[in-house]
Image (spheres, rainbow, N blue to C red):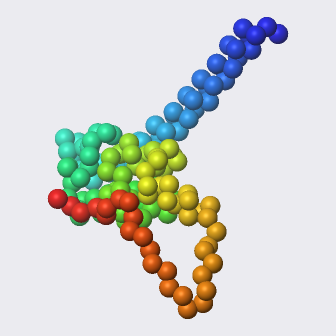
C-alpha cells in the first residue's frame, strides 16, 4: 500500500471522527439553546455566542438553569453554571469537556488530586481564587 493511499485514508478517518465530534457538539449546542431560549419568544432568543447576561435577568437565568439541568440530568450542574459560562457556546464547550476556564479545570484538578494530609484539629487557610465571583452589574 502506498503512502499516498495511507495518507488519504488517515485524512478520511480523521475527517469522519471530527465530523462525528462536530455533530455531537452541535447536538449539545441545540439542547443548551433549547434550555436557554425555550421559555422566551423567538425574537428574544440568544444566539450561541451572545452573552446571556445582557439578555436575561437573574430570575430568567435561574429558570433556564433549571431547564438546563433537565436537559442534562446526568451532569451535576451547579446553579452558578450559567453565570460562569455566559453564552450557549461556552456552556456547550464546558459540557463537552472542551472548556479551559478555571471553573472547569478546577473540577478536573480536584478529581485528580488526592486529599491533603492535615493533622487532626489543624486548620488550613484557603487562598482566594484567581477569578472573582460573578456579580450582576
Quarter placement of the N terminus:
top right
Q: Is residue 29 visible?
A: yes
Image x and y of residue 71, in percent: 44, 55
Query: Which of the pair 117/24 is nearer the observer?
Result: 117
Q: Residue at x 46, y 47 (%)?
A: 100
Q: Residue at x 43, y 55 (%)?
A: 102
Image x and y of residue 19, in percent: 55, 28
Q: Residue 127: name its quadrant.
A: bottom left
List the single residue furthest toward the right.
1
Query: Which of the pair 64/7 is nearer the observer?
Result: 7
Q: Is residue 47 left or right of residue 109?
A: left
Q: Is residue 18 left or right of residue 6?
A: left
Q: Judge whether 72 appears above or below 122 on screen.
A: above
Image x and y of residue 53, in percent: 23, 52
Q: Residue 65: name its quadrant.
A: bottom left
Q: Residue at x 64, y 68 (%)?
A: 114
Q: Judge whether 126 appears above or below 92 on screen.
A: below
Image x and y of residue 109, in percent: 56, 59
Amino acid at each position: 500500500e502506498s503512502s499516498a493511499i495511507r495518507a488519504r485514508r488517515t485524512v478520511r478517518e480523521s475527517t469522519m471522527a471530527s465530523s462525528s465530534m462536530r455533530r455531537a457538539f452541535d447536538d449539545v449546542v441545540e439542547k443548551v439553546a433549547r434550555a436557554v431560549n425555550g421559555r422566551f419568544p423567538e425574537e428574544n432568543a440568544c444566539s450561541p455566542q451572545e452573552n446571556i447576561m445582557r439578555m436575561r435577568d437573574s430570575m430568567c437565568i435561574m429558570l433556564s438553569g433549571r431547564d438546563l439541568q433537565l436537559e442534562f440530568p446526568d451532569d451535576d450542574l451547579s446553579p452558578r453554571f450559567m453565570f460562569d459560562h455566559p453564552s450557549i457556546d461556552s456552556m456547550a464547550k464546558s459540557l463537552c469537556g472542551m472548556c479551559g476556564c478555571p471553573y472547569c479545570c478546577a473540577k478536573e484538578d480536584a478529581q485528580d488530586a488526592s486529599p491533603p494530609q492535615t493533622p487532626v484539629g489543624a486548620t488550613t487557610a484557603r487562598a482566594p481564587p484567581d477569578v472573582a465571583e460573578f456579580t450582576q452589574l
